[in-house]
Amino acid sequence: MRELKYAILGLLNQKSMSGYELSAEFGSALNEFWSAKHSQIYPELKKLTQEGMITFEVAISGNVLQKKIYTITDAGRRDFLEWLSEDQPMSSTPKDIFRLRVFFSNELSDQQRLTMFESHLEQHKLRLSYLKQQMEKFDGTPDDESPLLGDYMVLTGAIMREETTCKWLKKCITLSSKQDKEYKKTGD
Amino acid sequence: MRELKYAILGLLNQKSMSGYELSAEFGSALNEFWSAKHSQIYPELKKLTQEGMITFEVAISGNVLQKKIYTITDAGRRDFLEWLSEDQPMSSTPKDIFRLRVFFSNELSDQQRLTMFESHLEQHKLRLSYLKQQMEKFDGTPDDESPLLGDYMVLTGAIMREETTCKWLKKCITLSSKQDKEYKKTGD
DNA sequence: TTTGACATGTAAAGCGTTACATGATTGT
DNA sequence: ACAATCATGTAACGCTTTACATGTCAAA
């Protein structure tokens, strides 16, 4: 599959940069749908260089510190574009450990279950507000020619996803405590 | 992390079954948020047996075909319940190869981009209708005591997620072709 | 002078998929 | 007889994370 390969080629197709900078990209712009540690990136860059997909030039930061600035080659660009043009079927639902917990949550006490949902709701609310703040970097909606449109689309998708997750968690909280109030009023 | 371990323990906590049956569970009920092939399940069952989390009895189907029916032990149940009770932070966004493609999609022609979105929209619509059909197995909303509630919650979440994905894809289609109509009318 | 960011690598271990391998049972 | 499903395993390969390992640079 070599998915990391194409993530890297895609980024280098936008702009030449070092492994460290690529690493930073995976931590910011792409973080919403991809990630990779430097321990995976550096070996992949080595491999891509050997395969002729990219080349590098050594640059100096300060006096001696070396960094390798990688540039995509024509072969690399061709390969990347070919990959991008393939139509690939929808991938299977990704593993989700939280949903696994929810599936088994009838083994928890009502209180524990509620706490679990509320804790996650708080975290997703926070994530949502961060994403909305990210949205401010766009000055309106990019038009269909803009190279920013892809970025805008994935951010929009991420916000919609988080909003839905929050709604779902609220619904789960309602379902968990649905009969609780009546129960307690009668029981106490 | 041993997440497969807890997925298996959780299932065996509901009901004793064979590796083959566990395999089938991963293909149906849990498929919305977890999966595992038999090549991963059998070694894990072996390991869990060695660790004293589960035991098995050999049963015979037909005349000679053996199957191992696994049962969770008290130690296994304790371990599972402890894991379930831990409060774990929200996990980072899973890798999504389609969103990676969308991010880079400005390199595609308008037509290619549109086809990509439309193809995925069709697939997600199909998935959504399948999930809605699955929902019919529930006779109304399970109450908060029901062991079915977790199942109901994850199905609800999956439907909400697919609905949002469809909405997002439609939005992407609009954004891709936003200025196209005007453009073509003027250009032609 | 010390902290944090910059910068690049390797090693080990775990997780996951595909492929290899075998054989019984049931229904057509 | 044949196919589909039941049933269980191992091997090889690739991907990902965590930890190990080293050293520079800029700012406080």
Image (cartoon, coloured by chain):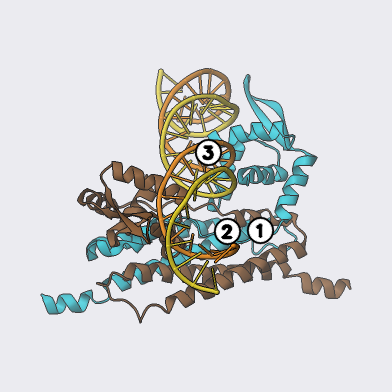
Chain colours: A brown, B cyan, C orange, D yellow
Taking the image as shown, residue C19 lies to the left or right of residue A127, namely left
Residue B124 lies in what quarter of the image?
Answer: bottom left
The mark found on residue B37 in the picture is: 3
Confirm whether circles 3 and 2 share one chain: yes
Proximity of marks 3 and 1: CB atoms separated by less than 8 Å? no
Q: Chain of mark 3?
A: B
Position of the C terminus of chain A by quadrant = bottom right
Q: Secondary structure at mark 1?
A: loop
The residue type indicated by label 2 comes to Ser
Residue pictured at 41% horizontal, 61% vertical? A25
Q: Residue at x 68, y 56 (%)?
A: B148
Of residues B125 and B104, the one nearer the viewer is B104
What residue is disc 2 on? B91
Q: Are marks 2 and 1 in contact (CB under 8 Å)?
A: yes
Query: Tags 3 and 2 in contact by the CB under 8 Å rule?
Result: no
Q: Earlier in the sequence, mark 3 or mark 1?
A: 3
The location of residue A20, given as percent across then percent down, is 41, 57
Chain under callout 1: B
- Mark 3 or 2, nearer chain start: 3
Secondary structure at numbered mark 2 = loop
